[in-house]
Image (tube, rainbow, N blue to C red):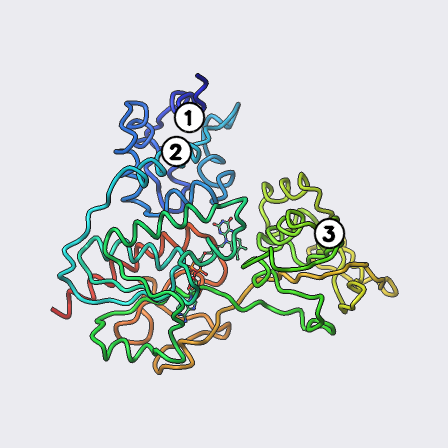
Amino acid sequence: MYDFNAIEANRCLVCKKAKCQLHCPISTPIPEVIKLYQSGAVCEAGAMLFKNNPLSVICSMVCVHEEQCKGHCVLGVKGEPISFYKIEEEVSMKFLNERTLLMGERNLERIAIIGGGPAGITIAFIMARMGYDVTLFEAHNKIGGVLRYGIPEYRLSNQVVDLIEEKLIEVGVKIRPNTLIGPVITLDRLFEDGYKAAFIGTGVWNPKTLIIKGETLGNVHYAIDYLKSPEVYRLGSHVAVIGAGNVALDAARSAIRNGAEKVTIVYRKGFEDMPATQQEIREALEDGIGFELYQYPVEIKEEGVVIKAVKRLKDSNQFEEITGSEKLFKADTTIIAISQSPRNNIVANTSELSTNQLGLIVTDESGRTTKEGTFASGDVVTGARTVVEAIAHAKVVATTMDAYCRSLR
Ligand SMILES: Cc1cc2nc3c(=O)[nH]c(=O)nc-3n(C[C@H](O)[C@H](O)[C@H](O)COP(=O)(O)OP(=O)(O)OC[C@H]3O[C@@H](n4cnc5c(N)ncnc54)[C@H](O)[C@@H]3O)c2cc1C
């Protein structure tokens, strides 16, 4: 039988100074995992991956492998690089499906995790396995954050996020769904109830706006809202998506999968300037998404978007508007995807928690906020970034929180 992963594992040179590992933001021990895999110790390989990154299965599916492990494989210099992420997916899935995670003794302090995205889930796993009494508060009805309510199902199945949730329960994490911390349960009330430390990993869920006329019309939506449940929207046949990052491309590709006949990305620069990765752009083109480049929106109407052309100034990254170039780009629906910023539910209902001018929570490098006993990481600290970055930093913050709790004993 053709076994792609076994062939990939055997092709791997198991480099001593592995560049794939070096360019992985969470330093996945790739050569060691490959060695275990080659010897048939698949669950042990999975345990090693899980210990380094409790969401390795998710990273195997959503990381930008072409810029990280795969992009730096030495075999890629002259030939085909190793697709380690496929091995990672197989190994991690087997581990999660077949191994029962040991529950910590739960004899350490009570701690609160606010937000069940990659950052909060990572901290919850680590702290629960250390023996902390962990409660995770999640505003949505299920945990996952962007993994469940942002990244579309065709890229990351919710079944995988469900499996992660099962594992959290297995290690003793208590989950309070549909619980928005801030307006009713404040951060201060958590401390009154005996929580010794709190972690904030609430992400960025407010869409940034274009601040142009027409944004409130009935045929205009923000991508971050649309992606929560694309199936409930009636977009019509032609959709314009404004923006060219991963959220814009996910919205465009979801619209095509949910019945739109024609979907066009409207972007004020060229392909080479897009924040989306090459892989995402390639896949969007394969899905038949159109691109209207060097155009920016000046107004949204019931009939579509009024766009104006720009041109790049010679040898520069500056752009100049082309006078008189305004035209109506016809679309039944316009989706706006120009990044997100944090909501202020927690910050507005507590004291001592500092934010910067973008509304992001201010922390030191180890994740300490300006409020005693309160820690934060993930997008709510860095602004919109990536899953693996949220996980990697959450690991650091778990160590900080543990040290803080020890200092109270
Ligand atoms: C559409 C989209 C596609 C993306 N695709 C990729 C990708 O392919 N690869 C990649 O690496 N990155 C991707 N990203 C970025 C990545 O998902 C984020 O960087 C990552 O999820 C950040 O993790 P987080 O835990 O900080 O926040 P989030 O994932 O945003 O999770 C925060 C959680 O906190 C909850 N919450 C918020 N406020 C409260 C409150 N007051 N009380 C209780 N709970 C609260 C939210 O409901 C949410 O569940 C994508 C982002 C989007 C929006």
Tag 3: amino acid: Thr
Instruction: Determine the CA span between mark 3 and mark 2.
Output: 35 Å
Could you say where residue 28 lies in the image, as x and y percent from the top left?
A: 35, 40
| Cα distance in 3D space between marks 1 and 2 | 8 Å
Disc number for residue 264: 3
Q: Position of residue 248 (x, y in %)?
A: 62, 55
User: Residue 90 shows which numbered tag?
Assistant: 2
**32 to 111, vertically: above or below:** above
* Rendering quarter of residue 339: bottom right
Name of the residue lying farthest toward the right = 324
Q: Secondary structure at mark 3?
A: strand
Q: Nearer the viewer, residue 257 or 320?
A: 257
Mark 2 vs ligand 1: CB under 8 Å? no
The Cα atoms of the two marked residues, 3 and 1, are separated by 37 Å
Q: Earlier in the sequence, mark 1 or mark 2?
A: 1
The x, y position of residue 329, in whole percent, is: 81, 59
- Amino acid, disc 2: Glu
- Category of crowding for the residue at label 2, using alpha-carbon neighbours closer than 10 angstroms: few (below 14), some (14–19), many (at least 20): some
Q: Is mark 3 within 8 Å of ligand 1?
A: no
Q: Quadrant of the rendered structure where residue 321 is?
A: bottom right
Nearer-N-terminus badge (3/1)? 1
Q: Quadrant of the C terminus?
A: bottom left
SS class, disc 1:
helix
Q: Nearer the viewer, residue 27 or 114?
A: 114
Residue 162 image offset from top left, x and y in percent: 39, 50
Residue shown at 38%/73% (left/top)? Answer: 181
162 w.r.t. 366: above or below: above
Q: Earlier in the sequence, mark 3 or mark 2?
A: 2
Find disc 1 in the rendering and name its residue.
5
Q: Which amino acid, mark 1? A: Asn
